[in-house]
Image: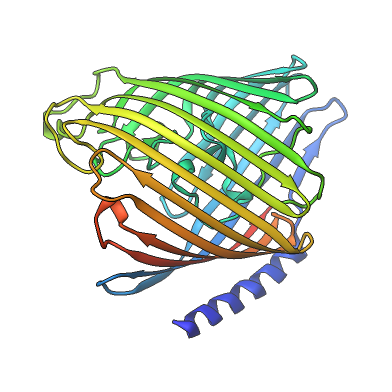
Amino acid sequence: MKRIIVITLGLMFSLAGWQAAIAGGVKYKTEEGDYVKLGGRIQLQYHWKDPEGGERSDKILFRRLRPYIEGSVHKNWKGKFQWDMGKGGVSIKDAYFQYKGWEDINVGIGNMVFPFSLEGRTSSKYQQLVERTFVGDHNYGTPDRQPGIHVSGHFEEKTINWAASVAMGAVDPDNKKLDFDTPIHIGAGSDWSQGVIGGANIDWYPLGHFKAKQGDFKGEPKVLIGVAGFNWKNDGDNLDAGRSKKDVDYVGAFEGHAGFRGFGISLDAEYNYFQAGLIEPGIDSGIYLDSGTELKNAAIEAGYMILPKTLEIVLGYQVQDAAGYEFIWSASSVGLNYFILKHDVKLQLTYQMGKNRDGVDGNNMNELFVQTQYVF
């Protein structure tokens, strides 16, 4: 196993050096302001799993292979579409057009990030840990991109930011999860529970605004406090007797979050609470007890720049509880991030120790993630 890690790290350092030499991206802009922009991200990942009482396994994969095209040929309007060819196969991500003609408000129509969960709204390319924790994982309540109307804005010089969305949400029937995926998927989604989802978030930056990026490169102290919530209801249009024990009827959610950046420290803390129910009564399965659940997620992630703007040590802790769990599922993480060109070119290593997976006593597993990233 050690030999595999060394080989993988060596490969990734070599790849990172090659990537740094070609970093850039392409943007063409006319004198009238029309433009087209091509970009994307490449994430090559090594994943090693060691389940207690089971066989070890490992693999190398493209975790994300995600190009995008963005452009504008009309004043105050822009469009973007992005797709992924990584771990989950070919799937549509961003696919929207947006009006930006008002000073403090943007209006978008299409498949966009839903305004819930601080970690969920932080792009995968700006994460401290290689993989998201429970509070930002679409498998456990946080909606993935959803197609609909999305409005966002700010006031008081971005001291207060807000966003709201009304969209068509989809839940992939699986009693072990609460998986809010996007209904706009290539070759999938015909058996998903669908319905209207509405939600909003508000963030307060008392010391000045900072972008949704983990890791502190500036050193100036900044603070974030925010809340969010949503409601989703099955519209009954896509029910199936063959999966009736898994069709979700409703979901209501609330979350609170806080963040700190400064002095080389990056700290995020978040708590999510979901109430959900199945359409068919009397089901005891996965996260559900008598067809209902209270799913609770909490996580804290902290990073410190050992070498300013270059080397960061990261610690994380996350817990999940549900009505159908006998024991709380928890995971502790420790990692290192090596920034070659900040988040654009970086190497990440995360070692995660999971206990009582899926709420089952003794279902423990340790995992190692090594990932290199190139963003252009």
In this view, the residue farthest toward the bottom is 3
Tally of marks: 0
Q: Is residue 190 visible?
A: no
Q: Where's residue 74, x and y in %?
A: 73, 20
Instruction: Please state the horizontal and vertical placement of residue 310, each as a whole percent of the image.
Output: 75, 64
Q: Locate residue 25, reporting x and y percent.
A: 74, 50
Instruction: Tell me if residue 204 comes above or below residue 27 in the rendering.
Output: above
At x 34% / y 52%, what residue is drawn? 329
Decide which of 44, 322 is in the foreground and name it: 322
Q: Is residue 347 above or below residue 165?
A: below
Which residue is most to the right? 31
Determine the residue located farthest toward the top in the rendered image: 102
Does 70 sit above or below residue 196?
Answer: below
Residue 280 appears in the rendering: yes
**Colouring of the image:** rainbow
Instruction: Name the residue at 79% across, 61% down.
Output: 308
Position in image of residue 21 (x %, y %) = 77, 66
Res 164 quadrant in image = top right
**Left or right side of 283 for 335:** right
Instruction: Please report the residue visible at 20 percent of the width from the left and 34 percent of the height from the top.
Output: 246
Q: Is residue 117 left or right of residue 320?
A: right
Please tell me in which quadrant of the rendered image residue 325 appears. top left
Residue drawn 51% across the image and 78% down it = 5
Residue furthest front as drawn: 327
